Amino acid sequence: MKKTKIISMVMAAAMAASVSVTAFAADKTITQDTTPPTGTTNVKYTVNPGYVVTIPEEVELVAKGVAATKTVKVDNGDGGKVIIPADKKIKVSITGAAYGDATEKTGFKVANTTESSYTIDYTIDGKDAPTVDVITVDADDKGTKDLAFVRTTDGAVAGDYTGTITFTVALEDA
């Protein structure tokens, strides 16, 4: 019986220690003696930034001179406008690999998976520069951009050709 009483007391103490206590900020009081009989209350709300940039997972180049079109989308994730500070913009760009030395043309290429010295050139929206600006979206806006990937050279040898491009998303000053 004494053992049960001790266990009950320990359980009661543990329950009392686990009770949460909510602390409230001190409210302002206006009484008959307050001059002037007014008070102010701060009202707050935070809008967290939110945007989603959707890029193509893969692009399959087609016949020379024919565009393979892929879309880049910038929105809030639900098809709505991006939520960013008013003085900012979202800028999406693409960077490809530069081939050759500084005197040679640089641009977008895919390389033969068996012998990487064999390459096929392509452009993105008619540009073969190593970096292409894709889309810029201002605060309280959204956007899509169709990109045309066009093969500009033929493969010298049969086989699979692969390469990568890097999409960069930057939040910049408007």
Image (cartoon, helix red, strand yellow):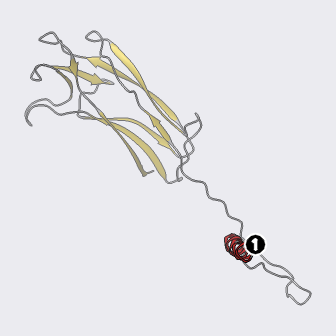
Closer to us: 86 or 16: 16
Quarter placement of the N terminus: bottom right
Name which residue type carries label 1.
Thr
Residue 63: image location, x then y, percent: 28, 9
Which residue is disc 1 drawn over? 41
Q: Is residue 74 left or right of residue 154?
A: right
Closer to us: 130 or 14: 14
Q: Report helix, strand or loop for mark 1.
A: loop
Q: Where is residue 131, by image quadrant?
A: top left
Q: Where is residue 134, by image quadrant?
A: top left
Q: Is residue 61 left or right of residue 139?
A: left
Q: Residue furthest bottom?
A: 33
User: Measured along the vertical axis of the image, is residue 5 above or below residue 169?
Assistant: below
Report the label total: 1
User: Measured along the vertical axis of the image, is residue 83 above or below residue 44?
Assistant: above
Residue 150: image location, x then y, percent: 29, 18
Residue 59: image location, x then y, percent: 34, 21
Closer to us: 83 or 123: 83
Residue under the image location 83 percent in, 82 percent down: 29
Q: Residue furthest front?
A: 1
Residue 96: image location, x then y, percent: 24, 33
User: Measured along the vertical axis of the image, is residue 54 above or below residue 146?
Assistant: below
